[in-house]
Every structure is written in structure tokens, then in C-alpha cells.
């Protein structure tokens, strides 16, 4: 028996990085996947990887910050697979800068994609999650826990993801829906690719990590699998650092 047998999982930001790795792992564990991404091509690629491996998946183009798009991917999920068991709110953006150098556009975009989108998806998925006794996982960041430099919009919104997770968890704990967050440290994904190609920047990110390696998409995927599965059935409102020990050191 696999850990997510016949579960239906929506994964946002599934066209790349943590989202794609999680989609692949959830599918291996028996879940049917709705791979949501702003990029239709990469969403479809993720779905195709799963189908080629013998699983079930669809790719859906959506801007997670747009309520109509959110309603559409929720509807597409129930139309295709009949229910929703897992919502992995994982899409996110990173805008560098401190309070002086961050533009109001970057600030608002960060709030919309990193925060409001999670509210919208939870809002429209909740009736289905209540029916399935499902769960939500939100991708926050180590940057939402510690004082993260030169990333005011990112750190602020990721801190809010942790508060949002706890608030949803407490509202729905007695109704059978769990909500947890994952706080990745620096990971090797599309988001960080260009930065990590600069040796000094890479060394700077590695320096504070006790395990002396960067996170891989599979590290996040296996944490998400645990939280999504019944193995975590007594865990809610938790923000789990997956960061090589960074935030505990
Ligand atoms: N990579 C890191 O070091 C790191 C660290 C901590 C947290 N995170 C978080 O992990 C999550 C996944 O990021 P990743 O590192 O895999 O990056 P990534 O860039 O590889 O993947 C993010 C995906 O989200 C999609 N996306 C962006 N905006 C979207 C929108 N409005 N609607 C739908 N899809 C959208 C992108 O197209 C992309 O495919 C993000 O929430 C990010 O903030 C990343």
C-alpha cells in the first residue's frame, strides 16, 4: 500500500523545483495530480512525466493570485478526479530588496502571489477538503522564521504564510482538515538557479547551513509527502523547517 493511494492532490507551482518533485513523488505514492502553474508548458510537462511513469495527472495553467483562475483549477480538479484530498500551496516568487530598494509593485506582487493566493485556494478548496477530511500544505520559507537579509517583501509574506497556516489549522482542527507549512532553506531550483551560479553567492548561502549542503527538490517533496499522508494525522498548524539545520543553529 502506498502512502497516498487514490488521493487527489492539487500542487501549485508544479512546473518547476519543489512543486514538480513533489508532484512526481505524490504520484509514485498513488495520488492523482493536478499540476498547476502560470506556465502551461511546464505544468503539462510535469503531468506528462507522471503519465509516462504510469500515473494520472493533468496540467492546468493558472495565476494563483487570480480568484477566477483559482476557481477554475478547483473545478478542473473535481471534474477530472471527483474530489480534492490535498492542496499544496507551493507557488511563490522572490523579489530582492530592502525597504528602500523594493518597489511598491514588487511588494504588492509578493503579497498577491505569496499570501493572497494561499487564501484564495484554501477558500475555494475548503468545501471539498471538509468532505474528504483532507489537508493543506503551504510553502513558507526559512526567510519567514529568521531575519532574512535584503528580501523585505519575501520575508514578510513568508512569515505571514506561517501565521495563515496556524490560523487555518485552528479553525478546522475539529472539522477534520489539517493545515501545515514547510519552511525550506536555500534550495537548488529555478528560483535560485541564477544566484547560485555565482560562486561567492553560493558560498554565502552555504555558510550558515550546518549540514553544508543546499536543499534539493526531493528534500521538500519527502517532507510534503509525510505531512500530506496519514502518517501526520495528529499534526496540524506546524511549520516544519527543511533547511539542513539553518534555522535551529
Ligand atoms: N528555492 C529556494 O531556495 C526556496 C527557499 C524557501 C522557499 N521557497 C519557496 O518554495 C516555493 C517553490 O519555489 P521553487 O524554489 O521550487 O521555485 P521555482 O521557481 O523553481 O518554482 C516556482 C514555480 O511557481 C510558478 N509560479 C510563480 N508565480 C506563479 C503564479 N502567480 N501562479 C502560478 N504559478 C506561479 C513558477 O512558474 C514556477 O514554475 C515558493 O513558494 C518559494 O518561495 C524556495
Image (cartoon, rainbow, N blue to C red):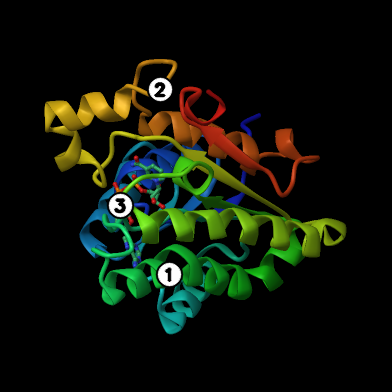
- How far is mark 1 from mark 3, CA to CA? 21 Å
Picture disc at residue 209 = 2
In the image, residue 89 above or below residue 26: below
Quadrant where the N terminus lies?
Answer: top right
Regarding residue 62, the answer to whether it shows in the image is no
Q: Earlier in the sequence, mark 3 or mark 2?
A: 3
Front in this rendered view, residue 38 or 7? 38
Q: Residues within 10 Å of mark 3 (few under 14, many from 20)?
A: many
The picture places residue 171, in percent across and down from the top left corner, at 79, 65
The reply, left or right, for residue 178 in relation to residue 55 is right
- How far is mark 2 from mark 1, CA to CA? 28 Å
Q: Earlier in the sequence, mark 1 or mark 3?
A: 3
For the residue labelled by badge 3, is the local secondary structure a helix, a strand or a loop? loop
Picture disc at residue 135 = none
Picture disc at residue 111 = 1
- Give the residue at the far right of this rendering: 174
For the residue labelled by badge 2, is the local secondary structure a helix, a strand or a loop? loop
Ligand 1 within 8 Å of the CB at mark 3:
yes
Regarding residue 66, the answer to whether it shows in the image is yes
Picture disc at residue 15 = 3
Residue, x 60% and y 68% (percent of image)?
A: 122
- Give the residue at the far top of this rendering: 211
In front: label 3 or label 2:
2
Residue, x 29% and y 69% (percent of image)?
A: 106
Choose top left, top right, bottom left or bottom right for residue 174: bottom right
- How far is mark 3 from mark 2, CA to CA? 27 Å
Pointer 3 with pointer 2, Cβ within 8 A: no
For the residue labelled by badge 1, is the local secondary structure a helix, a strand or a loop? helix
Front in this rendered view, residue 173 or 75? 173
Amino acid at each position: 500500500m502506498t502512502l497516498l493511494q487514490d488521493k487527489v492532490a492539487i500542487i501549485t507551482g508544479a512546473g518547476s523545483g519543489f512543486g514538480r518533485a513533489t508532484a512526481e513523488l505524490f504520484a509514485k505514492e498513488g495520488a492523482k495530480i493536478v499540476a498547476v502553474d502560470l506556465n502551461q508548458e511546464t505544468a503539462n510537462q510535469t503531468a506528462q512525466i507522471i503519465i509516462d511513469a504510469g500515473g494520472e495527472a493533468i496540467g492546468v495553467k493558472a495565476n494563483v493570485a487570480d480568484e477566477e483562475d483559482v476557481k477554475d483549477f478547483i473545478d478542473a480538479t473535481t471534474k477530472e478526479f471527483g474530489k480534492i484530498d490535498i492542496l499544496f500551496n507551493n507557488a511563490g516568487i522572490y523579489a530582492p530588496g530592502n525597504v528602500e530598494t523594493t518597489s511598491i509593485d514588487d511588494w504588492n506582487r509578493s503579497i498577491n502571489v505569496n499570501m493572497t493566493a494561499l487564501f484564495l485556494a484554501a477558500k475555494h478548496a475548503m468545501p471539498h477538503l471538509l468532505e474528504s477530511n483532507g489537508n493543506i500544505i503551504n510553502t513558507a520559507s526559512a526567510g519567514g522564521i529568521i531575519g532574512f537579509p535584503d528580501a523585505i517583501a519575501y520575508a514578510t509574506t513568508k512569515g505571514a504564510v506561517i501565521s495563515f497556516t496556524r490560523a487555518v489549522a485552528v479553525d478546522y482542527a475539529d472539522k477534520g482538515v489539517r493545515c501545515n507549512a514547510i519552511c525550506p532553506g536555500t534550495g537548488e531550483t529555478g528560483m535560485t538557479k541564477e544566484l547560485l551560479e555565482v560562486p561567492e553567492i553560493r558560498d554565502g548561502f552555504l555558510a550558515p547551513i550546518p549540514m553544508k549542503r543546499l536543499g534539493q527538490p526531493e528534500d521538500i517533496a519527502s517532507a510534503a509527502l509525510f505531512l500530506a499522508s496519514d502518517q501526520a494525522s495528529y499534526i496540524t498548524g506546524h511549520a516544519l523547517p527543511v533547511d539542513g539545520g539553518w534555522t535551529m543553529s
